[in-house]
Image (tube, helix red, strand yellow):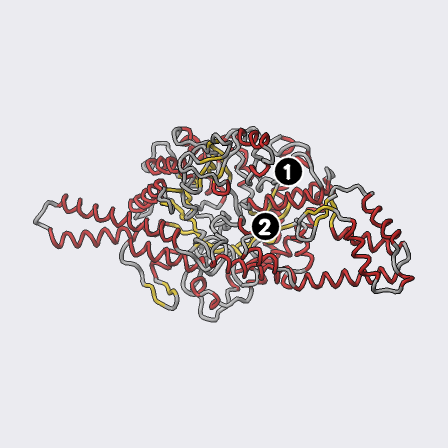
Amino acid sequence: MKVIKRDGRAVDFDREKIRVAISKANKEVKPKERATREDMNEIITYIEDLGKKRILVEDIQDIIEQKLMELQRYELSKKYIVYRYTRALVRKQNTTDESILGLIRNENKELAEENSNKNTMLASTQRDYIAGEVSRDLTKRMLLPEKISKAHEDGILHFHDADYFIQPIFNCCLINISDMLDNGTVMNGKMIESPKSFQVACTVTTQIIAAVASNQYGGQSVDLIHLGKYLRKSYNKFKKEIEGKYKGKIPDDVIEGIVQDRLKAELKAGVQTIQYQINTLMTTNGQSPFVTLFLHLEKDDPYIKENAMIIEEVLRQRYEGIKNEAGVYVTPAFPKLVYVLDEFNSLKGGEYDYLTKLAVKCSSKRMYPDYISAKKMRENYEGNVFSPMGCRSFLSPWKDENGNYKFEGRFNQGVVSINLPQIGIIADGDEEKFWKLLDERLELCKEALMCRHYALLGTHSDISPIHWQYGALARLEKGEKIDKLLYGGYSTISLGYIGIYELTKLMKGVSHTDPKGHDFAIKVMKYLKATVDKWKKETNIGFALYGTPAESLCYRFARIDKEKFGTIKDITDKGYYTNSYHVDVREKIDAFDKLEFESEFQGISTGGCISYIEIPNMAKNIDALESVVQFIYDNIQYAEFNTKSDYCHVCGFDGEIIINKDNEWECPNCGNKDHSKMTVVRRTCGYLGENFWNVGKTKEIKQRVMHL
C-alpha cells in the first residue's frame, strides 16, 4: 500500500509510524486513558485490511481518530486531534522552505521543467522563482478563498500563474506598437521619439517588448505590419541622400540599384536586431520575452510592398536559425511566428504565394511559423483578422467610442481551467449527475476568475507606466486607475478546459470523433460557451472560452486523478489528458480529417484555440506540407506543425538519434549521449512526452524502448 503525502509524494505504508504517533499522544494523558499495544495493533490491522493500493495520509489520520473514539479513548483522541491541528498550523505557516531550497540546490524537478525558456540554474531565474514560490504560498494561504485553494489542490480546477498573483499584473497582451512608434513613448523616465528609420524602429520595438515583458507575466504579441512605413522612411532617406550626391552624374537606374542595396542591408540588420535582441536580452523574470510576431498583409495597405519584404526577411532568417554556443544553427524558441493565409497568398496563384512557399519551407525545418486562415477568422470574429496573444488566446471583438474595431492595446486578465475528465469519472456515465456537477464546478471557476479580476481592480497606472501611461495598452494619467479597461469587454478573462476526449470516453464510451460522442462533446462545448456568455452579461466583464495550451496541466490533472481514482483504461493510464478539444494522439486520423474535425470546435472556443498536426521530418517533402497549408486556409482558423524527428539540444541536430554499439542513445552529429539534452521520438506513435528512457531498468527493457 502506498501512502500519498500532502506534497503529492507516494511512500510505502509504514505501520510503525502509526504506533509512534499514538505513543506520542499517550504521553500527554493519564495511564488509564492510554491506548494499549493491542489497541494500536487493532487500528493498524483495520487500515491494512482495507486493501487499498493507495491511501491519503489525511485518511489514515481520520481513521485513527475514529478508532480511538470507538475504543472510548476520548481524552487520547482529543490530544491526537490537537496535535494534528498544531502540526497543520506549522505546515501552513511555512510551506515554501523545501521548495525554495530544492530550487537553489537544483533539486526541484517540477520547477525546472515548468517553463522551456527559463533556466533554473541562473541566479536571475532563481530569484524570480523564489519570489514566485512566496507568492504561491501567500496566494494559497491568505489571498484565495479556502475552497478555491482546495479545488486547485484537488485538481478540480487550475488557478493559473499563482506565482504572480500577489502583484496587480496580468496575463497576455497585444502591444499597441503602432501608437508607441508613431507617437513616441517613455521608458525608464526617458523620452523615446518616433523613429526616423527602419533600423531604429526595430531597436525601439525590442526595447518596448523587453519593458512590457518585465512588467507582466504571459506573452506579448506585436503586429509587424506597422514597421512597413519605417522601411519606406529608410528608402526615402537613402534615395534623397544618393540623389543629392549622384543625380545627373550616373543613370537613375544605377541610383535606384544603390538605394535598393542599402535598403536590403538595413532590412536584414533590422530583422536581425529583432531576432537576436529577443533571444539574447533577459527580462526581469529571468527569461527571454515570450513574444509572438504577427506576419500578415492587408490588401489596401499603402505599405504592402514593404511589409512583404519584412515578412520575407523574417522567414528567411528563421529558416537559417541562430547559432548556439557550439556554433551550430538551431531553432530559437522565440519569437514565435504566426503567418496569415489570405486570398492573395493561399497557394492558389496569388501575388504573394512566394511568401507562403517560404513559410512552408521554414516549417519543414524549424516548425515555425504557425498558420492562421484569414477567411476562417473573419467568419468567427465579425470580419476581423488580428493576432493571438502570446499564450495563443484571442480577444473578443470590441469597438471604441467611434465604432471602430480595436484589438491592439488590449489584454487578458487571467485564466482558470476546469478539469473535465474528473467530472466524467465521478459522474460515471450518469448525465444528470454530470450536468449538475459541471454547473457546481463552473461556479467555482467563476469565483476563482473573479478573484483575478478583483486583484486588478483599483490598480493605479503608476504600477507599470509602460503599459498604462505610455501607450503599450493605454495613455492614462499618472495616478489614474485602470478600472475602465477591466469592464465592457475591453480586456478578456478566460475559462480554460482540459480533456474533451477523455470526458466523452467516460460518458459515452467512445471518442468525440465517433458520431455518438461528437454530439455530446459539441453539447458540452456549447454549454461552456453559453456559460461564459452568461457571466459576461451578468458582470460586464469580457469572459471568454479558451482552449488552454497547457501541456504541463494535461499531465498535472491526469496525475492527480490517477492518485485519487486509480488506473482507468484510456483515461488515467496514459499519464496525460488531451488538451482542450484535441483528438487524442493515439487515434488513427490523418492531418486533413483532424483539421476538418477540430475546426468545428474552434468556432466555439473563440477565446483561444489552436490545432496541432504531428508530422515526420518533411524537409524532402515540401509539396505535402503545401497541400496541408492550402487545406488550413479553406478549413480551419489556426493550426501548427509539430515534427516527429529527433533533436539534439547540444548541437541542434534535427534528424534521427542513433543507438550506438554500446546500446546507448547518441547524436550522430556531435556524439552527445546525455538524455536530458536530447528529444527522442517514439517511432510507433510520435510521442513527444517526458523522458521515457527512464523505464529502462534492465538491458532487455532498454533495448525494447530504444527500438520503439
**If the image is split into quadrants, where does the C terminus sit?**
top right
User: Which label was assigned to residue 495?
Assistant: 2
> Between tags 2 and 1, which lies in front?
1
- Circle 2 packing at 10 Å, graded few (<14), some (14-19), many (20+), is many
* Residue 627, placed above or below residue 289: above
- Circle 1 packing at 10 Å, graded few (<14), some (14-19), many (20+), is many
Q: Secondary structure at mark 2?
A: strand
Residue 105 relative to residue 641: left or right: right
Q: The disc labelled 2 sits on which kind of residue?
A: Leu
Residue 705 relative to residue 37: left or right: left
User: Which label was assigned to residue 502?
Assistant: 1
Q: The disc labelled 1 sits on which kind of residue?
A: Glu
* Residue 670, placed above or below residue 478: above
The spot of residue 383 in percent (x, y) is: 45, 45
**Number of on-image labels:** 2
From this viewpoint, is residue 298 visible?
A: no
Q: On the image, which quarter does residue 330 sit in?
A: top left
